[in-house]
Amino acid sequence: MARKRFREEEEATADMTPMLDIVFIMLIFFIVTTSFVKEAGIDVNRPEAQQASQKPSANIFIAIRENGEVWMDRRMVDVERVAANLERLLAEQPTDMVVIQADEGARHGVVVQVMDQIKAAGIAQISIAAEND
């Protein structure tokens, strides 16, 4: 009688392997479908603006330092290569807006050149980041 009871208890256990497989598949799915923000990779001293407003978050940031260096995706790029690098980033993650984080001491000409390169890559919405009081 004792042997029969042991066999019944053994058959009543649930196999956890299929459930673990499903959990791991869902984890992989969520990791693959997560969108990642392409940050410029450096901090800049943004100018202050009293009328600055919060915009919807963008996925691509371009930083311009005071000395004219342009940073995208945590690496320095040449101004003439901004459009090519932006097209590569857009192929990975399409977006309709780019945020320029220009240092308050950056030359206006470099900012305009970067804006021209962004327009050449097909992005119409460009935002300039500023500090709000």
Image (cartoon, helix red, strand yellow):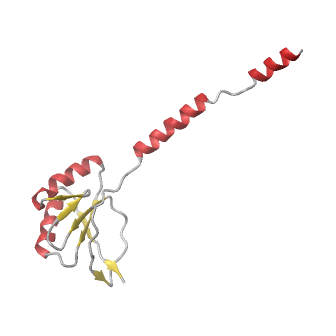
Instruction: Answer above or below: position of 55 versus 30.
Output: below
Q: Is residue 33 left or right of residue 3?
A: left
Number of on-image labels: 0
**81 or 4, nearer to the observer:** 4
* Direction front: furthest residue: 2
Q: Nearer the viewer, residue 120 or 21?
A: 21
Q: Nearer the viewer, residue 17 or 88?
A: 17
The percent coordinates of residue 53 (x first, y second) are 35, 76
The answer to whether 23 is drawn above or below residue 91 in the figure is above
Vertical order, 67 against 39 (above or below): below
Q: Which quadrant of the structure image shows residue 56?
A: bottom left
Looking at the rendered image, the quarter that the C terminus falls into is bottom left
Q: Quadrant of residue 16?
A: top right
Image coords of residue 22 (percent x, y):
54, 34
Residue at (12% x, 62% y) in the render: 79
Work out whether 123 lies above or below 20: below
Residue 102 on image: x %, y %: 22, 72
Taking the spot 26% from the left edge, 80% from the top edge, the residue there is 47
Where does the N terminus fall, quadrant-wise? top right
> In which quadrant of the rendered view does residue 59 lie?
bottom left
State the residue at coordinates (18%, 78%).
105
Compared across the picture, whether 5 is left or right of 25 comes to right
Give the percent coordinates (x, y) of residue 11. Answer: 74, 21
